[in-house]
């Protein structure tokens, strides 16, 4: 999970606009989008590429800034960049295709397909639902690998078998965002298909959709052929490296590279309903169910609105950020890749601006609320129930890792503090902040489909505890 004059647009965009000539872009849309993005690029907040489409036709595509400063490589819509968690949408699609073909049983134990999987009762469905009890962070494995040693999924699972032979919770009973779970799901695909993960994606998706700039990165970055898009952040008036890590030989959750053009093809196929067979889409688009409660992420690893017609997923890895959004009712899509850090509130605002500009809705200035900073000693002040008409209740509680958020009586999600005054909530993809003093009076939530301000309920108005 990576501020914002017409007088600037020509200079900012010129360096990264190669590859756009083949598309007759919508002039009005181009003006609206450039007016939003060019100031961000000029302020060293955004470099990357954006593609907007309707009915399979590209209406806007443009690159901004540099993909590799040392090599003077400009960003274009065809420049591949690290896709982070966008890989999960392909892994989930691959599993569901093999389920449709009768080659995988979602409720089969993972051990049936992956020899040495450490937890006997965990099912394939629980891998995809982020409800498996595996170590949630790759940092868990740091003590068990040498700096120059490639980390593979199989090797990490062997570490789990020795160091965490019992799941951290009973699989299927809670949500915990799981990268390793999707890496293990990729091993299931390899075992069943008899192909490498990358070859499987190439055969089933990339070749069919014309995704020519999509591939798995080499584990050792020294083995990279050609010039690689690198990650940066603007600090002390210069671009500083904030790149991917070396020696990562695991695939399924991340470590795939995509261009904005390629992701647009993936998004357009979903918007048109042709990405997967109808029966696969019908089954996979249902929300995953954890402990009897629906997850905000469906079986195919998409966040969708209440109608199920508008869906998206994002990927974040250090400086890299990606977005794929599609709207089946309007047959529209947005794809974005970036190699520069951007404050999360402003990043979601940009994503929503692109979505709204494409749909012809107003693009509005959206200043970030005046959040209050919280630290280890003051986090407990945020504990309480917040409510708003039409939204319902949001309960914030203290947990071992810091804070957790529960909407009404649904699933509980960990809140990760990504800045002194800002939290990110994977599983619902919310950016959250608090305002109103040491015992905050207000909870602010922003996501692709929600912009909400919830007020703290007084203690006497707290709802009854959920069962």
Image (spheres, rainbow, N blue to C red):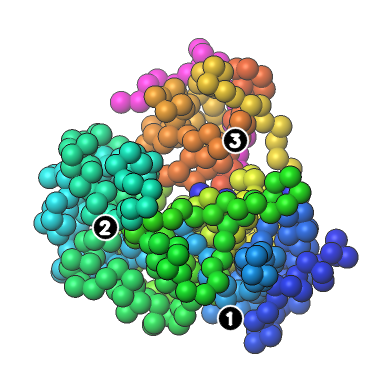
Check the picture and name the quadrant holding the C terminus. Answer: top left
Direction from residue 73 to residue 15 in the image, left or right: right
Going by the picture, which residue comes out furthest to the top? 460
Image-quadrant location for residue 442: top right
Numbered label attached to residue 57: 1
Q: Residues within 10 Å of mark 1 (few under 14, many from 20)?
A: some
Q: Nearer the viewer, mark 2 or mark 1?
A: 2
Residue 271: which numbered mark, if any? Answer: none
Q: Magenta span has 176?
A: no
Height in image: 294 above or below 193?
above
**What residue would you read off at disc 3?**
419
Q: Nearer the viewer, residue 3 or 223?
A: 223
Span shown in magenta:
451-467
Q: Residue at x 76, y 77 (%)?
A: 27
Q: Position of residue 287 (x, y in %)?
A: 34, 52
| Contact between labelled residues 1 and 2, with CB atoms less than 8 Å apart | no
Instruction: Tell me the CA gap for discs 3 and 2.
Output: 32 Å
Q: CA distance from mark 2 to mark 1?
A: 33 Å
Q: Earlier in the sequence, mark 2 or mark 1?
A: 1
Q: Which residue is at a point 34% across and 46% down the rendered structure image?
A: 146
| Residue 417 percent location from the top left of the image | 53, 34
For residue 316, say whether it is visible. Answer: no
Mark number displayed over residue 185: 2
217 left or right of 292 in image:
right
Asked which secondary structure carries label 2, the reply is helix
Are circles 3 and 1 on residues that touch, CB within 8 Å?
no
Give the alpha-carbon distance from disc 3 to disc 1, as whole Å: 39 Å
Image position of 441 (left or right of 383): right
Q: Name which residue lies at 21% across and 61% down.
A: 188
Secondary structure at numbered mark 1: strand
Q: From the viewer's perspective, is residue 226 above or below residue 306?
A: below
């Amino acid at each position: 999970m990576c501020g914002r004059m017409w007088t600037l647009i020509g200079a900012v965009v010129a360096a990264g606009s190669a590859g756009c000539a083949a598309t007759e872009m919508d002039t009005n849309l181009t003006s609206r989008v450039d007016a939003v993005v060019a100031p961000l690029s000029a302020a060293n907040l955004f470099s990357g590429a954006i593609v907007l489409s309707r009915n399979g036709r590209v209406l806007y595509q443009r690159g901004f800034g540099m993909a590799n400063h040392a090599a003077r490589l400009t960003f274009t819509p065809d420049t591949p960049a690290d896709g982070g968690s966008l890989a999960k949408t392909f892994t989930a699609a691959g599993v569901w295709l093999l389920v449709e073909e009768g080659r995988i049983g979602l409720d089969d134990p993972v051990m049936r397909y992956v020899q040495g999987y450490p937890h006997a009762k965990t099912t394939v469905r629980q891998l995809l639902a982020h409800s498996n009890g595996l170590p949630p962070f790759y940092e868990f494995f740091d003590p068990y690998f040498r700096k120059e040693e490639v980390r593979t999924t199989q090797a990490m699972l062997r570490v789990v078998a020795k160091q965490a032979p019992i799941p951290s919770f009973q699989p299927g009973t809670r949500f915990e965002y799981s990268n390793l779970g999707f890496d293990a799901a990729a091993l299931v695909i390899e075992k069943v298909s008899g192909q490498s993960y990358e070859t499987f994606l190439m055969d089933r998706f990339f070749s069919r959709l014309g995704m020519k700039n999509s591939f798995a990165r080499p584990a050792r970055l020294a083995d990279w052929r050609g010039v690689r898009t690198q990650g940066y952040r603007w600090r002390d008036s210069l671009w500083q490296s904030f790149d991917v890590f070396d020696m990562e030989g695991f695939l399924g959750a991340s470590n795939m590279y995509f261009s904005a053009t390629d992701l647009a093809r993936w998004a357009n196929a979903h918007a048109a309903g042709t990405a997967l067979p109808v029966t696969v889409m019908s089954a996979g688009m249902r929300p995953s169910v954890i402990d009897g409660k629906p997850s905000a992420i469906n079986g195919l690893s998409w966040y969708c609105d209440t109608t199920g017609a508008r869906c998206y997923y994002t990927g974040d890895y250090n400086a890299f950020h990606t977005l794929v959004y599609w709207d089946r009712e309007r047959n529209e899509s947005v794809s974005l890749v970036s190699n520069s850090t951007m404050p999360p509130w402003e990043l979601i605002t940009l994503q929503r601006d692109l979505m709204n500009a494409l749909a012809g809705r107003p693009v509005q200035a959206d200043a970030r609320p005046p959040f209050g900073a919280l630290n280890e000693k003051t986090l407990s002040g945020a504990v309480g129930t917040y409510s708003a008409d039409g939204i319902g209740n949001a309960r914030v509680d203290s947990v071992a890792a810091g804070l957790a958020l529960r909407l009404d009586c649904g699933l509980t999600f960990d809140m990760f503090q990504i800045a002194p005054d800002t939290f990110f909530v994977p599983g619902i993809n919310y950016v959250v902040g608090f305002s109103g003093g040491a015992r905050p009076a207000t909870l602010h939530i922003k996501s692709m489909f929600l912009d909400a301000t919830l007020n703290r309920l007084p203690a006497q108005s707290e709802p009854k505890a959920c069962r």
